[in-house]
Image (spheres, rainbow, N blue to C red):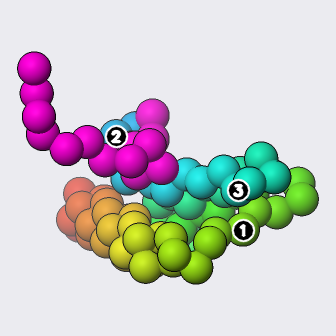
Amino acid sequence: MSTAPTEPEQYATDAYGTPCYRHTDPDGDQLLAAASLIPEQGPGVYFRTSPAGASIPLDHLDQFIARLQTIADVAKAEAAAKEQQTA
């Protein structure tokens, strides 16, 4: 039996294996942040919320910001790799 700590569900990767952040607030509203390729603009970070929006508690804010940095780093690395492929 593995005793290695697992990442919280909100840090699971997306269907493509890239890091993302998922959160469901007490009202059931959801937030997703993930790396994205914005047509005609390049890499970025994609945010999606439930129609009513979603909130993140202050005690989760540091982890959310850290995860956003990870997501941004992945988007930048993917952009650089794609740029090298076309060069």
Q: Is residue 41 visible?
A: yes
Q: Position of residue 43 (x, y in %)?
A: 47, 68
Q: Nearer the viewer, residue 75 or 27?
A: 27
Residue 27 vs 69, above or below: the answer is: above
Tell me which amino acid carries mark 3: Asp
Specify which label sits upstream in the sequence, 3 or 2: 2
> What's the residue at 11%, 34% (across, down)?
3
Tell me which amino acid carries mark 1: Ser
Q: As drawn, is 83 to the left or to the right of 41?
A: left
**Secondary structure of the residue carrying numbered label 1:** loop
Tell me which amino acid carries mark 2: Gly
Tag in front: 3 or 2: 3
Q: Quadrant of the N terminus?
A: top left
Q: Which mark is residue 25?
A: 3
Q: Nearer the viewer, residue 68 or 10?
A: 10
Characterize the magenta stretch by its predominant secondary structure. loop
Specify which label sits upstream in the sequence, 3 or 1: 3
> What's the residue at 19%, 44% (across, down)?
5
> What's the residue at 64%, 63% (across, down)?
47
Q: Position of residue 84 (x, y in %)?
A: 21, 65
Do labels 3 and 2 touch, CB within 8 Å?
A: no
In the picture of the structure, the residue carrying the numbered disc 2 is 17
In the picture of the structure, the residue carrying the numbered disc 1 is 55
> What's the residue at 74%, 54% (across, down)?
26
**Secondary structure of the residue carrying numbered label 2:** loop
How far apart marks 1 and 2 lie (CA) works out to 25 Å
